Amino acid sequence: MSTVAKQKKESVSPKGALWVTAFSLGYLLLSYGLIGFKPEQLLLVGLFNSLYYLSPVTRKFALGFTIFIVFWVLFDYMRAFPNYWFNTVHIKDLYEAEKAIFGVGSGSARLTPNEFWLQYQHTFLDVLCGIFYLCWVPVPMGFAAYLFFRNRTQFTYFSLTFLLVNLLGFVLYYLYPAAPPWYVQHYGFEFIPNTPGNTAGLSRFDAFFQIELFRGMYAKASNVFAAMPSLHSAYPLIVFYYGLKNRVKSVNIIFGIIMLGIWFAAVYLSHHYILDVLFGILCAATGIGLFNFLMNRKGAAYRAVQRFIKAIS
């Protein structure tokens, strides 16, 4: 292929530019109508468009990461349709189930694991758990970027599994709205709609470093009644699984430590019950199994995925 022909093939087509512009404007308008304007929306659109027009490699990178953009947009739009509009929020029954199955102590003095750890807080654990919690999105994103430049097939499989697990989790959020442990600690068993997000035990991390990192993050929470399943607990399992598949060797030891650390931190920080964590693990395992099943069948889903891989390769 001549240099001119190659450059023409790799340049942005008018049709592609039109689609990107249409989707960018459509996203901004729809977002404004559903949840109002936020600076992050412009940042997302600006970053995607910059990567799309910068070079052929960054264009493929942007297209590949549209899978994660879909996840983020759906997660953000959940605030427009709170799950407690559709089903009763589970507060006391979930709390009592946690205490009955995993409670510490006996008789009337029985505590949930979250309540137990409230009595045994330690600065070292506060900082360590805060660090683990900071990994829940950057680690999957970083691993996805690594896979993009190493193996586009594995990148696509990982990204779509990540999206599928999130979709399963979102469905469960609406079928079974659930309050986190910190909600019971602050408000008891009364349902209070429009409850703002809360950093819970992560406030101790912010206080130690005299920052407002987690406070700023949780102030933007889409819905506090989305504790079951814990997707915080699902993500590191997906990373660990694909780390094993791609033989990242010693790095997977780090992935395993982060996975166990996030599971513990979710409970220690009063963001999730053990039941939430277990269902998050189950959600991840189900999503991984379902995606592998669809790929092994080599049907319509498999062919669509292969076309996508070809488009970003």
Image (tube, helix red, strand yellow):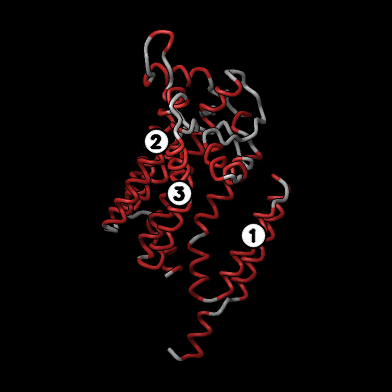
* Mark 3 → mark 1, Cα distance in angstroms: 21 Å
* Callout 1 amino acid: Leu
Query: Which numbered disc, 2 or 3, marks the residue that appears first in the sequence?
Result: 3
Q: Which numbered dot is residue 269?
A: none
Q: In the image, what residue occupies the spot 57% across and 76% down?
A: 12
Q: For mark 3, what is the residue?
A: 135
| Foreground tag (2 vs 1) | 2
Q: Within the image, what quadrant is residue 2 found in?
A: bottom left
Q: For mark 1, what is the residue?
A: 43
* Callout 2 amino acid: Phe
**Closest to the observer, 232 or 2:** 232
Question: Would you place residue 295 above or below residue 7 in this image?
Answer: above
**Image quadrant for the C terminus?**
bottom left
Q: Dot 3 lies on which element?
A: loop
Query: Which numbered disc, 2 or 1, marks the residue that appears first in the sequence?
Result: 1
Q: Which numbered dot is residue 264?
A: 2
Counting from the top left corner in percent of width and height, residue 107 is at 39, 8
Question: Would you place residue 266 above or below residue 166 in this image?
Answer: above
Residue 45 as seen in the image, left or right of residue 161: right
